[in-house]
Image (cartoon, rainbow, N blue to C red):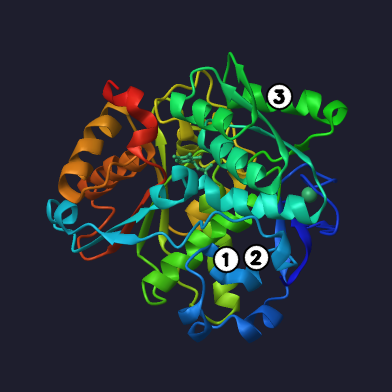
Amino acid sequence: MHLTDLVCTACSKPHDAAVPQNVCTACGKPLFARYDLAAAGRTLTKASLAGRVKSLWRYREVLPVKNDADIVTLGEGFTPLLPAPRLGAKHGLAHLFIKDEAQNPTASFKARGMTTAVSMAKQLGLKKLAVPSAGNAAGALAAYAARAGMETHIFMPRDTPRANIIECEQMGAHVTLINGLITDCGAEVAKRKVAEGWFDVSTLKEPYRAEGKKTLGYELAEQLAWKLPDVILYPTGGGTGLIGMWKAFEEMERLGWIGAARPRMFSVQATGCQPIVRAFMAGEKFAAEHVGAQTKASGLRVPKAIGDFIMLDALRKSGGGAVAVTDEEMIACTREVGAAEGVFVAPEGAACYAALKQLLAEKRVRPEEVVVLFNTSTGLKYLECYGG
Ligand SMILES: *Cc1c(COP(=O)(O)O)cnc(C)c1O
Ligand SMILES: [Zn+2]
């Protein structure tokens, strides 16, 4: 609502938000939305939130859409932050939480990014959207675009979980399966988009998905009574959620809602695809492509991320880190979380619990700390992983 413009995350060049934008026109890096936070803070107050809609649109003033008429919604966000006492007790943790993002429309947290991206596409008069996806972004885009009456063109790896493919088809999207990875799908979109008149909604090559995802940060603060957790474990692919939360913390500090302290942010990846973990360990500013990427956690199968430098910077500034876990550990952890807490987590969610065990063993997380695991989708979308 109080969007002023877009600014490059690397070179700070400002960009006009009144027209469709992808990446920085000078350096090709991601753009961030910028707001008049002083104006936003006049109506968006902690007290004002009490009576608001139970979706991420409760943070209306710090979301980009100008007119309510352009909002394309299926009731996304404001998901429960579930206490996980039985799981925590196994490790002496008294304050373990699961942010259950499976409870979003299309059963993954990709809905957060797509509600804002598609709403802005509507505001800007776009009609045809295209996306390369590891699975859940495609399902979410297909759903929100259908609701907005737009055409969608989706490119997914052939071995994407079947639920994602079927979901897109049933939402009326044009689906193309590619023999390759999400990076190959992205190359196909890039090659065809100009001739076809498609707007590219790729992770962080479109500035507003991150705005929807940043509401994770606002929700965590609100649900924990304005005290951020000590530790966040986030299953990382393209990194929109991690980057979005980091941005939200900064905005909330400027709104005067929180102080300068930040949670320690940990990026969780699969051993078969861990570009961010490797770059973090090596002290690199950017992450090299993970060659031969492989993991059943399709959301983590992103061998190269355009926002790598933003993630690495946030992990380091937060005092956190990056952890890789095997697919076997994820699958075993699914049952452990399910049996203890009644949540059938996605492999990506299970990965966060597996990573937490590593961090506890290495004494990098202490028992008295407030720890949040992200369950980013549901095991029901990944039945193949469980012999289904
Ligand atoms: C996309 C996805 C991720 C990774 O999210 P990013 O914000 O791109 O890092 C994690 N888990 C699931 C289930 C996903 O669909
Ligand atoms: Zn730039």
- Relative to residue 123, is residue 44 drawn left or right? left
Q: Residues within 10 Å of mark 1 (few under 14, many from 20)?
A: many
Quadrant of the image for the N terminus?
A: bottom right
- Relative to residue 246, is residue 147 drawn left or right? right
Residue 116, picture quadrant = bottom right
Amino acid at dot 3 = Ala
Where is residue 164 drawn, in percent x and y? 49, 30
Real-space Cα separation, disc 3 to disc 1, in angstroms: 33 Å
Q: Residue at x 58, y 13 (%)?
A: 179
Q: Nearer the viewer, residue 337 or 279?
A: 337
In contact (CB < 8 Å): disc 1 and disc 2? yes
Question: Which numbered circle lies on residue 63?
Answer: 2
- Label 2 element class: loop
Q: Residue furthest top?
A: 179
Q: Residues within 10 Å of mark 2 (few under 14, many from 20)?
A: many
Q: Residue at x 18, y 55 (%)?
A: 88
Amino acid at dot 2 = Leu
Where is residue 256 drawn, in percent x and y? 55, 82
Amino acid at dot 1 = Trp
- Nearest to N terminus: mark 2 or mark 3: 2
Residue 42, picture quadrant = bottom right
